Amino acid sequence: MKNLLTLILTALMLSCATSCQYLVNKATYTDPSTISGKQGDVLVVINKDYWDSPLGQMIRDSLKQAYPMLPQPEARFKVSNVAPKGFTAMFQIQRNIIRVDINPSNVNKVTYRKNVWATPQCVVDIKAENYNSAEELFNSNAAQIKSVIEGAERERIISNNSRYSSVSIEHEVNKMFGGSPVFPKETKIYDKGENHMWLATCNTDYIKQYILIYKYPVVNGEDMMSESSLIQNNMKAVKSYIPVTREGSYMTHSKYISPEVEYLTYNNKSFAEIRGLWDLENDYMGGPFISHVMYSPDGKYMIGVEGFVYAPKFDKIQYMRAVEAVVYSFDWEGSEK
């Protein structure tokens, strides 16, 4: 009887995981006649001798670095390799490809291309005149290479969300904030007030993916984009607007790892990106979050768009990428896409 109960509970957990995993996969896989591979897969086309050399180790170490601000380390990309002679049609449809070509006739250069053999595909070409140049090229361009591939993964999710978007919810968000992310059709509004809206793109017992959108007035004479102001107002928002079930509990930032703030521009929008870990005070839940904060077009309000994940039994990188895509897709109403 005990074994039977264990099997039933395991099946329920897997079923729950699969229901939200479907949302992630639907947002990262495309028609099988186009690109192949799973989210985060990177194929490196390079001679085996180079792959087994320090250059190959450098490439592997860089691509497998931990994704930022997850509770447990998870490699950013899953890396495989094939020699140029084996780079046949079967491999040419991989979603993310890095090709390393070392030849004395080459001009040292890194180029980025889209949809070379499949769609939507990201291809990075590293051409070097000798081995040392190849090491220098990759080392100096590693951050950009990872950013381009990560951006390609994000755009795939946004593109698929756009094809199956929740137009009615986007209309409500637009009315309240003057702009909206692109929401997948499964999104539900869980709570809203004068200055906030709390939504779920996935909400099961084991996997939760939430989006919080909020605004607060600009204070004249205060640096609203300073790290201290951003973090203070973010903590105030999540404490005030995220409902909890246990009395005396509220959402806050982790006591052990401070949030990180970076100032970015994406799709002609400038914003502050806050990454960190959230906890529930007087409770036992937690997970990663990402928040974008920006001025409203009229300069009267700060607009915050935040995504956070709770998936204690599973790796979180795919779920985090899914909410990041929603956060990154925010755009002002009437803006040209």
Image: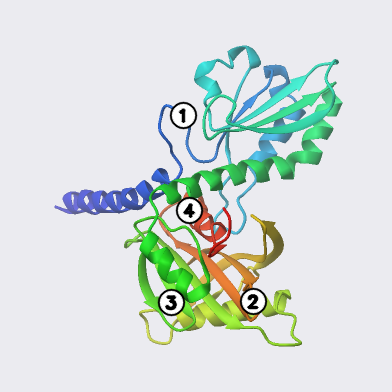
Q: Which mark is residue 34?
A: 1
Residue 290: percent from the left, percent from the top? 57, 63
Q: Could you say whether the residue bearing mark 2 is in a helix, strand or loop?
A: loop
- Residue 284 visible to the viewer: no
Report the mark closest to the observer, 4 or 3.
Answer: 4
Report the mark closest to the observer, 1 or 4.
Answer: 1
Query: Taking 40 as reference, is 178 above or below it?
Result: below
Marks 4 and 2, how far apart in space? 30 Å
Marks 1 and 4, how far apart in space? 21 Å
Question: Residue at the spot x=76%, y=29% of the render?
Answer: 55
**Residue type at tag 4:** Ala
Q: Could you say whether the residue bearing mark 3 is in a helix, strand or loop?
A: loop
**Residue type at tag 1:** Thr
Q: Which mark is residue 219?
A: none
Question: Residue at the spot x=69%, y=18% of the render?
Answer: 47
Q: Quadrant of residue 225?
A: bottom right
Q: Could you say whether the residue bearing mark 4 is in a helix, strand or loop?
A: helix
Tag 2 residue = 298
Q: Nearer the viewer, residue 325 or 83?
A: 325
Of mark 3 and mark 2, the one earlier in the sequence is 3
Tag 4 residue = 322
- Residue 222 visible to the viewer: yes
